Amino acid sequence: MAVADGGFRALDEKSLIEYIRATPALSSLLGDDLRALTVKEVGDGNLNFVYIVISSSGGSIVIKQAIPYIRCIGESWPMTKERAYFEALTLREHGRLCPAHVPEVYHFDRPLSLIAMRYLKPPHIILRKGLIAGIEYPLLAEHMSEYMARTLFFTSLLYRSTSEHKREARSNKFDLNREERWREDATADDICNGKGQQQWGSYKAGKQRRGEKNRSKPAIIAEYCGNVELCRLTEQVVFSDPYKISQYNHWTSPYLDQDAETVREDDILKLEVAGLKSMFCERAQALIHGDLHTGSVMVTTDSTQVIDPEFAFYGPMGFDIGALVGNLILAFFSQDGHSDNGKDRKVYKQWILKTIEDTWNLFHKKFISLWNEHKDGNGEAYLADVYKKPELWFLVQEKYIKDLFHDSLGFGAAKMIRRIVGVAHVEDFESITDAERRAYCEHRALEFAKMILKERQRYDTIEQITSALQNIPS
Amino acid sequence: MAVADGGFRALDEKSLIEYIRATPALSSLLGDDLRALTVKEVGDGNLNFVYIVISSSGGSIVIKQAIPYIRCIGESWPMTKERAYFEALTLREHGRLCPAHVPEVYHFDRPLSLIAMRYLKPPHIILRKGLIAGIEYPLLAEHMSEYMARTLFFTSLLYRSTSEHKREARSNKFDLNREERWREDATADDICNGKGQQQWGSYKAGKQRRGEKNRSKPAIIAEYCGNVELCRLTEQVVFSDPYKISQYNHWTSPYLDQDAETVREDDILKLEVAGLKSMFCERAQALIHGDLHTGSVMVTTDSTQVIDPEFAFYGPMGFDIGALVGNLILAFFSQDGHSDNGKDRKVYKQWILKTIEDTWNLFHKKFISLWNEHKDGNGEAYLADVYKKPELWFLVQEKYIKDLFHDSLGFGAAKMIRRIVGVAHVEDFESITDAERRAYCEHRALEFAKMILKERQRYDTIEQITSALQNIPS
Ligand SMILES: Nc1ncnc2c1ncn2[C@@H]1O[C@H](COP(=O)(O)OP(=O)(O)O)[C@@H](O)[C@H]1O
Ligand SMILES: Nc1ncnc2c1ncn2[C@@H]1O[C@H](COP(=O)(O)OP(=O)(O)O)[C@@H](O)[C@H]1O
Ligand SMILES: [Mg+2]
Ligand SMILES: [Mg+2]
Ligand SMILES: [Mg+2]
Ligand SMILES: [Mg+2]
Ligand SMILES: [Mg+2]
């Protein structure tokens, strides 16, 4: 994983235009007339710079560049810019598995930690902002359950052999710095999607002409071990800092001072969090997104797109499912802070609960369908020969899903807690300007999350969760 | 992990002598007079060739060579000879952590998959043979608990940071083919054991003189992902084959025909085995030996040496503890088959039970001591700041150990089952010549193992296990 820092420079609007002009893969996407490019930095995330680039002829791209520290904190908190490599790798892999819900990657420049991808045009907005605005997305549960079922199932041992999982799932397309190679490899990759033997043939022929050796297959779990710095950031901000005094923690003070202290003193809660943290660090169950909150999803009424997988690694599936569900629950609790501007949020809260139910239930259904469909495939975790009896097959799947449900509840609750008493908060609450009111919403969310984290084993269905939410007195 | 097969040749007694003569690191160990070397192949294991080499001047070494298939089955079952690399790497790492109980590695030749190590001289014998002979080893529990506590603790997240665990624990000493480098590196490694700054200095100076760059730190979990073929062998023979019809399975027929079928039809058993298999494949808890049965331990009354870690990888700690304890329980059940040759085995059976108790209880004690000793170290799994309150610290450790106990029971039971109805059996039973009597011992062991595998959560202490063993009617 030794990549020289050599060649890195942080771009700005001006130097980005020069970079695009000098990079045929990008300039060709933007059309011939490069004199009239408009570039706008729109990064509202915590870590990186994101530019929208539009040409006068109607072409458009998004450029994301990682810098070697955490943007919202500054150079005092260094963070490897290699995260862009893992983001590109994962956009590619998850995009291959679920192209309908992942923006296409056009180009990746490893020395610059720069990704060019499809611009998700307006009316696409960040899901979190839609939830704050009270907008219903009728296809959200359908789409997100599809994304999670496909990306998690196909990168798990239910679909892959252990060898594919640990070592040789596919060849590494990213260890190439010249964009020509990137594009050639993109062609090679198209084959995986069945786009034609012809292109693959000419790709190989080209390589042979130049006398290049076949690159060795890369590590898969092994490769993502390289994203450990981002994992450690999660370990710290999700599983450790909220449970101790930390300079980065904050909360709506003074209202939540007691709540924050109670979290730090809750032995049972901390015992449970330790178990989740171990699972996060040790269990390579699937290639997870790693940061799947409602700020990593862009939506319109028809379209749902998952962005920003820079925290991706082989981890527990429940961490992704829990991130999404936990952030939907945060949105639910924040509604009482948004309901005074003439618009009643009662109906909207019901839509959120329904979306939570549908997301899990559709995920469950789709995941099981994929598993049944591929039960005679490469996956060796549950050999058909051992588990073929229908009632046993059912039993095994029920147990897998039940465990996954409990993991998801645990991780979801941990993610809720950290957004209320940890370093990075969510706009759902932050946008409630009346501090006392905000604190009230946060307090209720925190109590619910603590209860779920400690008692999740007692819940068997998502409806039990949503009715618990329903029954919280105002 | 791409290593050319180029350069490999299977050695025999004669070519081995030539190899030794041509290899200064080895010939110097054996003394000056290489005319009178005696070489004897003693491999009684299932996979590899092992040679004892003795010179007339009193020098001695053991040479182990892996071949690209499974020795006891033949070329029809290919198996990467790269297993020798992981064995060498692990002997080195475990030897560094617990030098008293791991033979020293003198030399490793990766193209030849050849390891030279310390010859464990007579009266060292394989522990399994000692158990069959009814010999008591008063220090066995003390030594094995020490080995397991140290190797498992120091390679876990209780001691290491996540970065050290996944990516950069120590530099890779084995990717060097020239034995001079190996020896230089051995010198460097000695420093880890505190053998003196002087040698380290001259090592570094030597490297600088030759203008060598510091080699980049290797992957750690990532590196061992390369040993996936050996993991898959375990997955197959321990967690899958015994639970289905397989050409390799066998048992004491006809006596155990019904027992074997019952195993294949036991839904609850197979549900539990699936959970253990997932844990084996997904959970990178520590650098485990991977094959820690009583045939991988050589003993005298004073000395206990762990050999043969070719299955090593980052896996669940309980797999090692369970292997040892499960094989001691097999030894216990086999005693009734050995008690007719004039010697009463009642007392010996009590010694085995006591050894099982002591092994676990001493392991527990030592593991917790190491954890307490290093609680302010690099390990981030349980930050002192979060868990500092003494009663919480205690609670957390109790939970960790309880989970580990249940994992160990589960894996131990699975290992017992596979030795009775799977491909590879144990000499403890195989040496009972009367088939009916053997089947009787095996049947009782199998029943016990199935019960433990299904009901292990109900056991809290090792004494509950040994008294269950005690109370089985003859
Ligand atoms: N492909 C895209 N199309 C349109 N807008 C995007 C795209 N990718 C990112 N953005 C915008 O940039 C913001 C930050 O992007 P994100 O990938 O989440 O960066 P960070 O890693 O810093 O959180 C998003 O919230 C979104 O508004
Ligand atoms: N260092 C050693 N000193 C003495 N005998 C050894 C040594 N290593 C292995 N042996 C002998 O060789 C046998 C096979 O070695 P082992 O490493 O278990 O090979 P395998 O991987 O084929 O099981 C052991 O059972 C033991 O009798
Ligand atoms: Mg983001
Ligand atoms: Mg973010
Ligand atoms: Mg991000
Ligand atoms: Mg052996
Ligand atoms: Mg072996």
Image (cartoon, coloured by chain):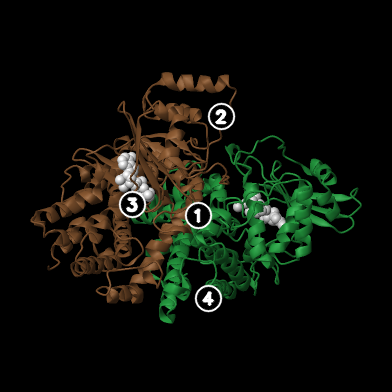
Chain colours: A green, B brown
Report x, y in % for residue B324: 28, 52
Mark number displayed over residue A420? 1
Q: Is the residue at mark 1 in contact range of ligand 4, meaning its CB lies under 8 Å from it?
A: no
Which residue type carries mark 2? Answer: Asn
Q: Are marks 3 and 2 in contact (CB under 8 Å)?
A: no
Q: Secondary structure at mark 1?
A: helix
Element type at marker 2? loop
x 63%, y 68%: residue: A134
> Could you tell me the amino acid type at mark 4?
Asn
Q: CA distance from mark 3 to mark 1?
A: 41 Å
Apparent side of residue A80 relative to residue B190 in the rendered image (left or right): right
Labels 2 and 1 touching (C-beta < 8 A): no
Q: Identify the residue position indicated by label 4 in the image.
A: A372
Marked residue chain, label 3: B
Subunit bearing disc 1 = A
B410, A241: nearer the viewer: B410
- Residue at 37% over, 62% down: B238
Q: Identify residue type, mark 1.
A: Ile
Residue B429 in the image: state x and y as whole percent: 23, 61
Amino acid type at mark 3: Asp
Q: Give the class, few, some or many, for how many residues have Cα within 10 Å of label 3's Cα (few <14, many ≥20).
A: many
For this rendering, which residue is in front, A101 or B150?
Answer: B150
Give the class, few, some or many, for how many residues have Cα within 10 Å of label 2's Cα (few <14, many ≥20).
few
Residues behind callouts 2 and 1 on a single chain: no
Q: Chain of mark 2?
A: B
Residue bearing the label numbered 3: B320
| Badge 3 and badge 1 both on one subunit | no
Residue linked to disc 2 = B214
